[in-house]
Amino acid sequence: MIFNHYKGNFLVKLWFIVAILFPFDASLLLPFSVLGTAISVNRILLILALVVTSFKIIQNQKIKVVNLGTEPVFMILIVFSFLSISWNNDKAGAIQAFTFLIISYILFYLGIYIKTKNLEYRLAYTILLISLMFASLDAILGFRLQISTQSEFKNEIISLFFNPAFFGATMVLLLPFIIQRTLTSKKIKLVFNVFINILVIYFVFRTGSKGIVVSLTLVYLIFIFHFTKKRTYFIKVIISCVIITVLTIFLLEKDYLPREIELKLYEISDIFSGEVWESADSSFGSRNMVWKVGIEKFQENPLLGHGFGSSYSVIYEEVLNSKVLAFHNWWIQILVETGILGSLLFVFLYSKSIVTNLIANHENRIIYLSILVSFIPISLTVGNVLQLWTWWMLFGITFVKFKGGS
């Protein structure tokens, strides 16, 4: 594997730092064409990680990889995406998207390395604790190392920015590891893990992302159903859910919850209202309109798509007056950009991972299955899954076949 054959695992540590800090740094979302004017610590680390990785690949003539049958599919997807630049009208967008795909590929194999070294729990706790630390500073002190908009990131050396959807998705994707430890730990560790669960729930609601809330709910439901055979765990989960529900209702009635959390809880019911799906002023209505445009554009070139990274240029004129400038739907996005061919490649990878864990015989498969299932509502929420780096590391982790639990 590309992360072997050197001492100290420097490259892994470098990518680890980049991936951890990414959810807070919107400057990495800026196009690579403005490298001269938009710089930050994370951007410098990202460039360094790419350069070092390239040298390691060149240096190691024999690159060992885990034989999972996925590398050819991933490589075909990369080659196809590169070729699609030729028929893509948005060349800059295509090059940027292709760069993110390469990063995703590297992070995918970083996930494989992490799993083979049994570091997945360390990954989960590290990213979650850092995430919760920054979120707590923002919530309690109103302190945020940030510039208010992405366009103002230029010339900022140190810049942190909360992207609510990416931030919430990162926490939910890592939460299954914490839930598993919560159900199996005792005394002080149990209290610590329960506290992390509470903080994650609080900050997920605080992001205001309905898709992330749905994803969070799915994770807990999967664990509840999984532990029905283990009465002790099941009773713990049920009691916890009842207490949380009753406490939430009580706090709402007494107006003890922060106003913004209270509003987010009430807004969840909006998804069942037909009006919000038709109103261009609501996030639901805007996304519904963009999805309809995406389906229409897909029909124009169903086999090969409009080219990798073409989303923005394809929908720009149609949604010029809308507040949504991305599909916020990974499945429609890859249909529009790569057509049926590219979509089938990704669906194959995703389905293979689910099947691998369904037939696996180890305790931790519930963790990986909940991650894969929770990805579905997340993929309908974030602007671009290619930029959700934690997902690609976890995606690699879910592919590793091993015997027994860890």
Image (spheres, grey):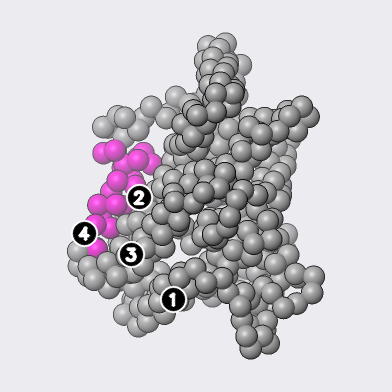
Q: Is residue 145 left or right of residue 69?
A: right
Which residue occupies 54% across, 28% down? 230
Q: Which residue is mark 3?
A: 343
Is residue 320 in sight in this rendering?
no
Q: Nearer the viewer, mark 3 or mark 4?
A: 3
Residue drawn at 57 percent across, 58 percent down: 402
Q: Kindly check if marks 1 and 3 are in contact, taking CB atoms under 8 A apart as contact.
A: no
In magenta stretch: residue 294: yes
Q: Nearer the viewer, mark 3 or mark 2?
A: 3
Residue 72 is labelled as: 1
The kind of residue on which mark 1 rests is Pro
- What is the C-alpha distance between the residues marked 1 and 4? 31 Å
Span shown in magenta: 277-298
Which callout, 1 or 3, points to the residue nearer the camera?
1
Name the secondary structure under disc 2. loop
Label 3: state its secondary structure: helix
Identify whether 170 is placed above or below 345: above
**Vertical relation: 368 (above or below) 40:** above
- In the picture shown, does residue 93 fall above or below 278? below
Residues under numbered marks 4 and 2 in contact, where contact means CB atoms less than 8 Å apart: no
Callout 3–callout 4 Cβ contact below 8 Å: no
What residue sits right under mark 2 in the picture? Answer: 322
Q: Secondary structure at mark 4?
A: helix
Query: What residue is disc 4 on?
Result: 296
C-alpha gap between disc 3 and disc 4: 16 Å
Q: Main secondary structure of the magenta part?
A: helix
Locate residue 343: give its quadrant.
Answer: bottom left
The crowd level at tag 1 (other Cα within 10 Å; few <14, some 14-19, many 20+) is few
Q: Earlier in the sequence, mark 4 or mark 2?
A: 4
Q: Amino acid at mark 3?
A: Ser
